[in-house]
Image (spheres, grey):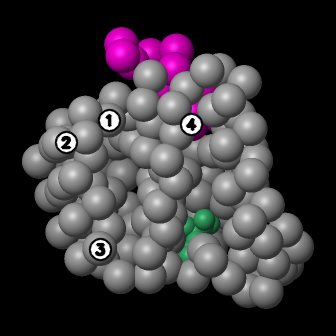
């Protein structure tokens, strides 16, 4: 089982950015946590972070050629704006699970639309780091490698 975890803009600033919303743990702690979850399940995992929309589109396209089995994606702010990321997820037809650290449904109105989510089989929002664990486990349980 090969899983690609994609994190969008400003997630590299975890621990510094708005700790009341995103917590005190930094991005390295998040990647270590996700790697540990994947290792526990003997899943191969690659974690990618970018602040650039096109780089995220490129990485999703590359996943097709790399024969990735499942994608976990937190597109961050691009969730609410990016038709390009939605189209990339649709283009590759790789099962994808959307994750948000915060409970976006209880936040500002501009966060209420998720374009990427329209191409995802499941969404976990508001569980902090644990949302990534839920997403990885969902893919492991539901996707045939
Ligand atoms: C986020 C929620 C988004 O609305 C926001 O732009 C982010 C992070 C989350 O993980 O809660 O950058 O995706």
Residue assigned mark 2: 64
User: Ligand 1: which quarter?
Assistant: bottom right
User: Residue 83 at what x, y percent from top left?
Assistant: 20, 68
Q: Are marks 1 and 3 in contact (CB under 8 Å)?
A: no
Question: Magenta-highlighted stretch: main secondary structure?
Answer: helix
Residue assigned mark 3: 55
Q: Nearer the viewer, residue 34 or 87?
A: 34
In this picture, is 124 found above or below 87?
A: above
Residue assigned mark 1: 68
Q: Quadrant of residue 85?
A: bottom left
- The quadrant of the picture occupied by the C terminus is top left
Answer left or right for 135 relative to 97: right
User: Residue 1 at what x, y percent from top left?
Assistant: 44, 22
Query: Residue, x 57% and y 82% (percent of image)?
Result: 10
The residues bearing labels 1 and 3 have C-alpha atoms spaced at a distance of 17 Å
Q: Nearer the viewer, residue 48 or 98?
A: 48
Dot placed on the residue nearer the N-terminal end, 2 or 4: 2
Magenta span has 144?
Answer: yes
For marks 2 and 4, give the one nearer the viewer. Answer: 2
Residue assigned mark 4: 135
Dot placed on the residue nearer the N-terminal end, 4 or 3: 3
Q: Nearer the viewer, residue 8 or 79?
A: 8
Q: Is residue 108 visible?
A: no
In this picture, is 56 found above or below 91?
A: below
Magenta range: 134-145
Q: Residues within 10 Å of mark 3 (few under 14, many from 20)?
A: some
């Amino acid at each position: 089982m090969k899983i690609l975890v994609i994190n969008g803009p400003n997630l590299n600033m975890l621990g510094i950015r708005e700790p009341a919303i995103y917590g005190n743990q930094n991005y390295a702690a998040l990647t270590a946590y996700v790697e540990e979850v994947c290792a526990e399940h003997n899943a191969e995992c690659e974690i990618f972070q970018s602040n650039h929309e096109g780089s995220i589109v490129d990485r999703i396209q590359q996943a097709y050629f790399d024969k990735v089995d499942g994608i976990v994606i937190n597109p961050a702010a691009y969730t609410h704006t990016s038709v390009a990321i939605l189209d990339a997820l649709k283009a590759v037809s790789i099962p994808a699970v959307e994750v948000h650290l915060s409970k976006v449904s209880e936040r500002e109105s501009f966060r209420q639309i998720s374009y990427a989510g329209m191409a995802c089989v499941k969404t976990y929002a508001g569980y902090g780091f644990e949302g990534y664990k839920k997403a990885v486990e969902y893919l492991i349980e539901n996707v045939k490698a």
